[in-house]
Amino acid sequence: MSDAGIVIVGAGQAGYQLASSLRDAGYQQRILLIGDEVEPPYQRPPLSKAFLSGAIEADAVTFQQPDHYVSRNIELFLGTHVASIERANKQVVTADGDRIGYDRLVLATGAANRQLPGAAGIDGIFGIRTLADARAIRDGLASATRVVVIGGGFLGLEFAAVARAKNVSVTVVEAAGRLMARAISPVTSEAFRLHHERLGTDLRLATSVKGLIADKGRVTGVELGNGTVLPADLVVVSIGVIPNVELARAAGLACDNGIVIDQNLSTSDPDIFSLGDCAVYPSRFAQVPSRLESIQNAVDQARHLALTLTGNMSAYDAVPWFWSDQGGAKLQIAGLSQGVTETFIRGSEVDLKFSVYCFRDDRLVAIESVNRPADHMSGRKLLAAGVAVLPSQVVDTDFDLKSLLPSPSQAA
């Protein structure tokens, strides 16, 4: 291997974790971590919760200070956009025209928020993605009285709960007939609908947005598909993301709703790898190759890739898991609920302490836990071990599901 080393494009969770894990794995060559943003690498999950609430400041979400990267011999390039990849020369070219050679290239380019048509150029409309976004929303929330959230997914609902805690009027507009419809079961959706209504949030489900209303360049309302106008002095748009694949596609790498990678996290070019929100990969936990937008996926893939790039080759096989904190209700999900045919419940939906066990063709494929962390942890272990779980065992509250797990000696 030459002195070119490993170049990581993208300084989010996946890129930061990979650089750190490479050093932990004993990698001695050059590591370059290149990020578009001027901020040092930071955590995104607290942005929609603790940071917006004012409970923490920016220094609490920043992974490390600049001297940390110096001490670990990680070259950090911030505010630097990689414009192209020259695969034949094994170089990346920045927007400033600088050329950087690589032995191995890793694309951790993440994703970008979907934009609401007609929102460009109107003040008071925000997405939640970056630290700059969160700062702007927090500043706006300090004086806002009427907030409209467009999108009833995880981020939108987390923000809605924060705003309600500040006694701000909040309306959530969701095109689907239930909350978080793409990610969770109808049972859990309904429990969270009741929870957010108890918090005082006005939910408009199965409702489209026709357009935005502005006065002198600032938003004043949201017009719904049925003609209703919701007054608003702050609008948060959370309608999903689009993977950042432009760099990969222009370089001729295979892309399909993300950068296509194999079980070793390698792209169609054996010297280029990808991971995190931008990457589509095969998993035994999914029916089709999937792109997962989660911190767990970014961290686990980064740690795995660090081992691969230091000579410890194996297939990536981590259990997908997710979480969301929404106004005192902690939702934790293990597995993927694609094609679920039956669900069974443990616990109390009324008390907001329950778990939904999701089966596909008599096989447990996902567990959704609300304020039941022990169920979540055991569920992750059950899915990882691939043990058979019967619906009758799930509904029998006297049956200890952990007893199905193999003993340490059997697992070995």
Image (cartoon, rainbow, N blue to C red):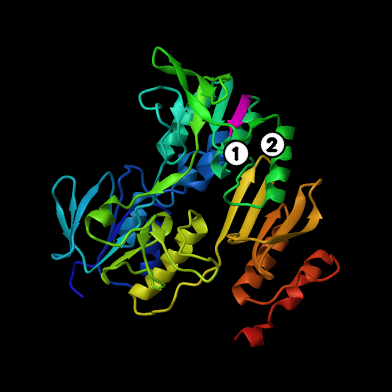
Q: Relative to residue 123, is residue 43 depicted above or below?
A: below
Q: Position of residue 7 (x, y in %)?
A: 26, 61
Residues tagged 1 and 2 counted as in contact (Cβ below 8 A)? yes
Task: Write the residue at 86% across / 68% down.
Answer: 398
Q: Position of residue 226 (x, y in %)?
A: 57, 24
Q: Secondary structure at mark 2?
A: helix
Task: Write the residue at 42% across / 54% down.
Answer: 277
Task: Write the residue at 80% across / 56% down.
Answer: 347
Q: Disc 1 residue type?
A: Leu
Q: Which residues are magenta?
A: 168-173
Give the spatial CA distance, label 1 vs label 2: 8 Å
Q: Disc 2 residue type?
A: His
Local crowd size for mark 2, using a 10 Å CA cut-off: few (<14), some (14–19), many (≥20): many
Question: Which residue is at the front of the view, 176 or 389?
Answer: 176
Q: Relative to residue 325, is residue 311 depicted above or below?
A: below
Q: Residue furthest front?
A: 226
Can you identify the residue that label 2 sits on?
A: 196
Magenta span contains residue 161 = no
Can you identify the residue that label 1 sits on?
A: 157
Q: Secondary structure at mark 1?
A: helix
Q: Residue furthest top?
A: 216
Question: Which residue is at the front of the view, 243 or 256?
Answer: 256
